Amino acid sequence: MIATERVCLFDGHCDTISRCFERGGGIRKSDGHLDLERTASFGPYAQFFAIFGDAAAEANLTPRQLFQEEYAIFQRELAANRDLAVHCRTAKEADAAFQAGKCAAFLSVEGAELLDCSLEHLEEAYRLGVRAVNLTWNHANILSGSNAEEQERGLSEYGKAFVRRMNQLGMLVDVSHLSEPGFWDVAEFCKGPFIASHSNARAVFSAPRNLTDGQFTAIIEYHGVAGLNMFADFLGDDPDYDTVISHLEHFLSLGGEKNVAIGGDWDGISKMPRGMSGIQDMAELYERLLRRNYSEALVRDVFFNNLMRVVSEVCTM
């Protein structure tokens, strides 16, 4: 069985803007994992572009300045490529982009320290068009511990207020990189769907960045999504396409047909599964799933509809 139309894709996480900041270049054509010339083969196609940087390593910039620098790059690149992509804030705006044959480019922030963990800066980011925020990257911050630092610490009272404000604004709370206690605090205090934009199944491969069955079940209960991450170190030993599929199949076995998405972590990872070199290879993954007799409706849900549904429910303005 092969796809009856162009592969549709809504990918939940890439670090392509950070790559532009660190190495120069743009998003139209690059030798990285993702560029608009390659993604033009998908239709429709939407992408969450993350503003990200290990602020502790950017000695010459404050976290706030790093956010501003990368936001300027995002704006510059969309202006230079307005024929291929448009900044979107809602599903309605994304639909308009698709009708025009363009990528719907959504914006996220990976690590609230880039907003100084400030409610004021969160609100400013919302006005600038940010629609998803990872509460932490690998570093713990005043909101919560992370999967790598202070793993026993959940949301502070201020962190809970931060989540509440995100809910009020209509921003997606992203729990990838968060500590497990922080995850469960989000599950308790978040109103509506939340996401793990780029996290795999810990039952398939034990890595602290991967989700336990209990965590994924909570994501199902809150009608959120988890995005399959293509980083080899989160997939298994010497992973290939079949390894990626094994993570998907585990999530499906838990009842996650409407709760799995793609979150490749493009341009933020050093090693991918054998045979994969970038986002263009999602078309091959799509075809392999069809050849395994998964229905095209289910595969389209995983590749596009599930994340778009969550955006439609949360990002309404």
Image (cartoon, rainbow, N blue to C red):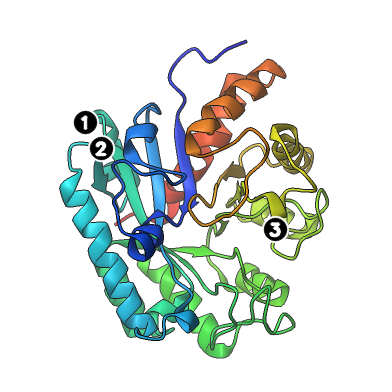
Amino acid type at image mark 1 = Ala
Q: Nearer the viewer, mark 3 or mark 1?
A: 1
Q: At 65% across and 76% down in the image, what residue appears?
A: 182
Q: At 64% across and 76% down in the image, what residue appears?
A: 146
Label 3 element class? helix
Classify residue 283 as left or right of residue 28.
right
In percent of width and height, residue 108 lies at 40, 61
Q: Disc 3 to disc 1, how far (Cα)?
A: 37 Å
In percent of width and height, residue 267 lies at 48, 53
Q: Nearer the viewer, mark 3 or mark 2?
A: 2
Q: At 34% across and 30% down in the image, what residue appears?
A: 40
Q: Residues within 10 Å of mark 2 (few under 14, many from 20)?
A: many
Q: Earlier in the sequence, mark 3 or mark 2?
A: 2
Amino acid type at image mark 2 = Ala
Q: Residue under circle 1?
A: 100
Camera-side residue: 171 or 191? 171
Assess whether mark 2 and mark 1 are in contact (beta carbons under 8 angstroms).
Answer: yes
131 versus 119 height, above or below: above
Classify residue 284 as left or right of residue 100.
right
Q: Indicate which disc residue 54 carries.
A: none
212 versus 54 height, above or below: above
Camera-side residue: 196 or 317? 196
Q: Residue under circle 3?
A: 218
Q: Residues within 10 Å of mark 3 (few under 14, many from 20)?
A: some
Q: Residue under circle 2?
A: 97
Assess whether mark 2 and mark 3 are in contact (beta carbons under 8 angstroms).
Answer: no
Label 2 element class? helix
Classify residue 214 as left or right of residue 157.
right
Label 1 element class? loop
